[in-house]
Amino acid sequence: MNYFLSRACRPVLIPLFFAGLTAAMSTAFAFEAGTFNNASAVGDAKGITTGTGGIRIVNCDQKVASRKRGVCINQMSAADFKALAPGVSWYYNWSSHPGDKPAGVDMEFIPMAWGNHADAVTGLRSYLASQPKKPHAILAINEPNLKGQAFITPEQTAKLYLAIKEVGNQFKIPVVGPNMAIGSPTNGSIKAVDPITKQETTYTFMVPFLKAIQAYIRNAPFEALGVHTYEGIGEVHWIVDSTHKDFNCPVWVTEYAWWKAPSVEEARQYLIEATDFMERSPAVAGYAWFKERAKDNPKISLLEAQPGKLTPLGEAYVNLPPHDDDLYYRIPGKLPAANYTAADRATIRSTIDEGGYFLMRADGGGSTLDYNIQVDKAGSYLLKFRVAGAGGKIELLKDGQLIATAITPDKKDWDTVQTTVLLSAGPQKLRVRYGTIGQCLHYIEFGQK
């Protein structure tokens, strides 16, 4: 359970009167996860070409910003924005105004209506009306269930949500929210009479709070929900999967970090695993690391004090690849193992091997990784696997058929094994299958013979 309490944005709460709730409730609420993911191709790097069927084709060494990946910020310089932009496609700052984003930086601002104060809705509406290009989402209500944040009852949250939803409907923008703390201590939790149980309730867990909101909005579904997580990797998996299952809507993890990570290296490994999980999870439509600079916990910061200088966590965050099924890598080239589209029983880890950041480790015999490649010229290719760890077979399959096999040595240090493979021209999907638990793969190099 997450009882993290510290946040940066704390406006004074002022009672707000809401009108037109019936009209807001009559609007269709449901959006699929794909609506959020594909509404805007923000953050795509230069060098992408479009192939048959709308697929995107890039070189193997091309960096592509994730459409899902964002960052929570208080303040960033032009150099900071430029350092993060190659891998981060959006940001928010707990307000409805973007701050000082420099011109020419391809990073989308997503506004938030933070809490129940006088200009939450009017400020949001004013900002959106002034923008020729609208954001692809609106964030609504920051931690209504946690003292020190929005901290309002489920009934007040429902009224505010519907008012924000009315603005979203006006501009045809889906609303993500409320954005919830998973849990809170008893003395930091909101109390109210629950509309379902009819009992006075102390909401120490987010799910009863959200179900109470739904009761007030006549059980209309949420378009998407935001959650905040600050414990280890297990909590990320649990809260994403359980929220998606309980509420059947896209999940945005709008704050995450391992607050109590013992070291920078362990915080970095958490970032790598959590981000990679959310990147490939169909339940997750967006996520944002907390935060650009965490002054009271610098080991989780993405940026050093020096403007534009990434921390080890920032380097990892910017360089983690997306796992988009429409993204194909052109060969010949050196394809990083982490640039997969689907993984089964394989875990991402950092590596100090030359020329890369990440490896993929087999968690079981028969673990698989799927890849999209674009072959411009049919023929025989020299296939090199950069490997370490346990020895065994490593196989390449196409359409379920084995097309190449190599034997990897049992050794701690990195080595390269090779074989040949015959490939037809055009876009195609390949599968790498590990033979042994503990095998590690850094990259696959395709070279024409």
Image (tube, grey):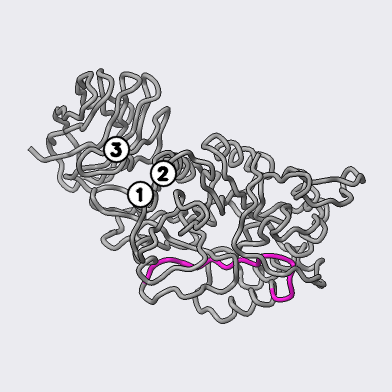
The image quadrant that residue 343 belongs to is top left
Residue tagged 2: 264
Count of numbered labels shown in the rendering: 3
178 above or below 11?
above
User: Which image quadrant for residue 50?
Assistant: bottom left
**Residue 301 in the figure: left or right of residue 82:** right
- In terms of depth relative to the viewer, which is nearer, 121 or 205? 205
State the quadrant of the N terminus: top right
Calculate the distance from the C-alpha at mark 2 to the C-alpha at mark 1.
8 Å
Magenta-drawn stretch contains 353 = no
Instruction: Give the SS element for disc 2.
Output: helix
Is 257 above or below relative to 143?
above
Question: Which element is circle 1 on?
Answer: helix
Which of pointers 2 and 3 indicates the residue nearer the eye?
2
Q: Secondary structure at mark 3?
A: loop
Q: Callout 1: 10 Å neighbours few (<14), some, many (20+)?
A: some
At 46% from the left and 53% from the top, the residue drawn is: 298
**What amino acid does circle 2 point to?**
Val
Callout 2 touching callout 1 (CB < 8 Å): yes
The mark lying in front, picked from 2 and 1, is: 2
Residue 312, numbered label: 1
Asked if one can make out residue 70 in the rendered structure from this viewpoint, the answer is yes
Per the rendered image, the range of residues in magenta is 105-119
Is 113 magenta? The answer is: yes
* Above-or-below relation of 402 to 197: above
Numbered mark located on residue 351 in the image: 3
